[in-house]
Image: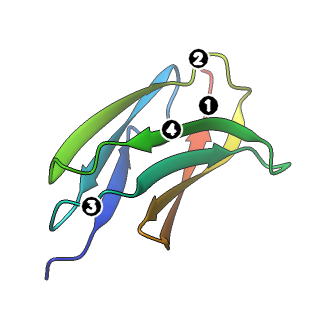
Amino acid sequence: LDIPGFDLFPNPANRETFVDLYLPEATPQVSLQVFDLTGRIVYDRPIDGTAKQQQIRIDCSEWSPGIYFFQMSIEGERLNKRLLINRL
């Protein structure tokens, strides 16, 4: 199936995480937002939707340990994933 989607790794993360994004076709309206548990946006970025596959590195070294919610918006459709920040 050609369904848009994304994966996060590593998860749990320590200092950085990577978003692997797959788009079945060029999509002009793609964005990524990350929210903490209080609903505050800690990351907000438009994504170039012309590449079908891409990897985005996110520096989360300044984020407090805990759970974060990644929301990818693809032409109005929202896909969600959780990330755990764990400092060992």
Give the number of the disc on residue 61: 2
Relative to 32, 5 lies left or right: left
Q: CA distance from mark 4 to mark 1?
A: 23 Å
On residue 21, which mark appears? none
Residue in the image at 50% along x and 38% along y: 45
Q: Nearer the viewer, mark 3 or mark 2?
A: 3
Q: Residues within 10 Å of mark 4 (few under 14, many from 20)?
A: few
Q: Residue furthest front?
A: 28
For disc 3, the marked residue is 27
Tell me whether circle 4 and circle 2 mark residues in contact (CB < 8 Å). no
Residue at mark 1 to residue at mark 2: CA–CA distance: 10 Å
The crowding category of the residue bearing disc 1, from other C-alpha atoms within 10 Å (few below 14, some 14 to 19, many at least 20), is some
> Of the residues tagged 3 and 1, which is closer to the observer?
3
Quarter placement of the N terminus: bottom left
The quarter of the picture where residue 3 lies is bottom left
Q: Nearer the viewer, mark 4 or mark 1?
A: 4
> Mark 4–mark 1 contact, CB under 8 Å?
no
Q: Nearer the viewer, residue 88 or 77?
A: 77
Residue at the image position 58 percent from the left and 39 percent from the top: 44
- Label 1 belongs to which residue? 86
Image side of residue 82 versus residue 8, left or right: right
Mark 4 highlights which residue?
A: 45
Relative to 21, is 40 above or below?
above
Decide: is 20 above or below 4.
above
The quarter of the picture where residue 27 lies is bottom left
Which quadrant is the C terminus positioned in? top right
Mark 1 element type: loop
Specify which label sits upstream in the sequence, 4 or 1.
Answer: 4
Label 3's element? loop
